[in-house]
Image: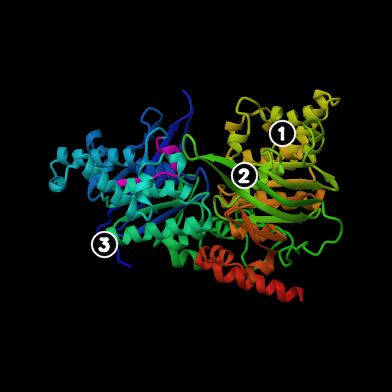
Amino acid sequence: MTMPAKIPLLTVRHLSIDFTLDAQQTHRAVEGLSFSLGVNRTLALVGESGSGKSVTALAIMGLLESSTCRISPDSSICYRGQELLKCSATQRQWLRGEEMTMIFQEPMNALNPVFTIEFQLMEVIKKHARLKRLANTPQSSSPSFDSNDSLHQKALALLSEVGLDQPERRLRAYPHQLSGGQQQRVMIAMAIASEPRLLIADEPTTALDVSVQKQILQLLAQLRERRQMSMLFISHDLNVVRELADEVMVMRQGRRVEHASVEALFSAPQAPYTQALLSCRPSVDHRPWRLPVVEDFLEGRTPSKPCTDRPLQSQRQGEPLLVVSHLSKSYDVSDGWFRRHSFQALKPTSFELARGKTLGVVGESGSGKTTLALTLMRLLAASSGSITLEGQQLMGLNARAAQRFRPRMQMVFQNPFASLNPRHTTGQILMEPLQLQNGPMNAAARARVAIELLDKVGLASTAFFKYPHEFSGGQRQRIAIARCLSLRPDILICDEAVSALDLSVQAQLLNLLQDLQDEWGMSYIFISHDLAVVKYMSDEVMVMHEGAVVEKAATDQLFAHPVHPYTHQLLDAMPQGNRQAIRHGAEQSLLGDR
């Protein structure tokens, strides 16, 4: 690895940023932040949502809205000896295009849905070429890309460099026709089009499955080495940071908590908050009764039952609660005006789920996990197969008969902000299912139940009167869980319910789900691409690939001795620090059972 240069590429000193909330109130998002980034080095900014990571990156890029944001006068952002906060708008635009670029967290929001990938890439290339000529810099001798053919070839070369398969075909595609990983590769291609010296990556692997995440991380590392770039990498996932970064800076509430090399921070973290972040993630070598949360470390508390592991429930006897047999889902897809073919999104799938047991479902994007969940919920009509809930066949029931069984199986969706009505208060959201399913219950009784549910999921009663936009992501997910609990379901389907949450919030929700299962005896179908979370939560794991179940086994058995090549591929895609430990922990659990 290249050693840092004596003069840093980027130096930030005493950065403080305030946002205007109203005429009298301001919120300090970043306070007194200082750090530097050397040439051909990667610095990771980690911390929970609201810690100021993205705001810091936007300030460096000059993308903060001046009407609502104020950077304090004594702040300094120096890039290659040039003070950015004193540059004109034209200079900032040139620097932003030629010297530094940014990969945003959600590629589908950053890409224009009405233009092809080729049009958007060519637009970026033309803009950079024009800026080079206007700036009259040494780079101005580079090609101007005036002809469509040269623009097309440059766009094609960029997609090839970022490892996108069939680049000619992808150029003609629209963003919605690409997978999440492919969209992220297009964003990276746009970012490196001008050959920048500094690349800022803001959560580029959030909510991606482990194999795609590994591909993106490898691509970023290769591009950095090949193009001699420096990288500011923003993430809340410390395992990802460990794979890529040279240095790590931990942030909390806008302040720097700790700054150290990757080796020093992971081997001997100094700050209690850093220790908390490292401990909140589900353990790879044992299954504690409760995951520690940030407050446990900051307030000096010891998590309950620290010395015993939560046992698996895979040996539980009795009749299965849910029996799924040869369930499948197919779509008719058009290839043109007169050609159609059938696409099987879910191939015949069979499994059983006992009461009080958790079935984990893993696989890459497009493997059929969500299709399975939506078909079980009858939000999609199955093409064939049967679903039996405690002896009652659910397939073929009319709408009224099916309505009686719907409360027994509920679903927590991945994006709570999209699944909660933004025009309804939390109270209205929680009382609506009660009104639909329990008609005789009066409004006062429904309100009491809603407040009890808020307390159950760890929210104050004042949340009853607030709207979804007034909560954080973790709080919104708690509301979504409370809405499902309002009908006391037997089965709760969690579809990537904790994927995009901070580690501390994720730990809180996983503890909540375990507590509810212990108290109410609920069964879970837990869908996730995070194998460490699946190992912590599940009694059995089902691996899906291209719409089919390729392997199903008890959790420890599957992680210790995977059989199918695709399962091996998923485990190998995990961050290296976890790979050996997770298999060692599973093997120890198996030996203990014997």
What amino acid type is highlighted by mark number 1? Answer: Ser
**What residue is shown with label 3?**
5
Q: In which quarter of the image is the C terminus?
A: bottom right
Q: Residue 40's quadrant in the figure? A: bottom left
Secondary element under disc 1, as helix, strand or loop, is helix
Please identify, in this view, whether the residue under mark 1 or under mark 2 is nearer the observer.
2
Whole-percent x and y of residue 61? Answer: 33, 42
Q: Is residue 235 above or below residue 31?
A: below
Q: Quadrant of the N terminus?
A: bottom left
**What residue is shown with label 1?**
461
Q: Give the range drawn in magenta.
A: 99-112
Q: How crowded is mark 3: few (under 14 residues within 10 Å), some or many (20 or more)?
A: few
* The stretch drawn in magenta includes residue 101: yes
Q: Marks 1 and 2, Cα distance to the nearest angstrom?
A: 45 Å
**What residue is shown with label 2?**
330
Whole-percent x and y of residue 67? Answer: 38, 27
Residue 465 appears in the rendering: yes
Q: On the rendered structure, is 302 left or right of 42? A: right
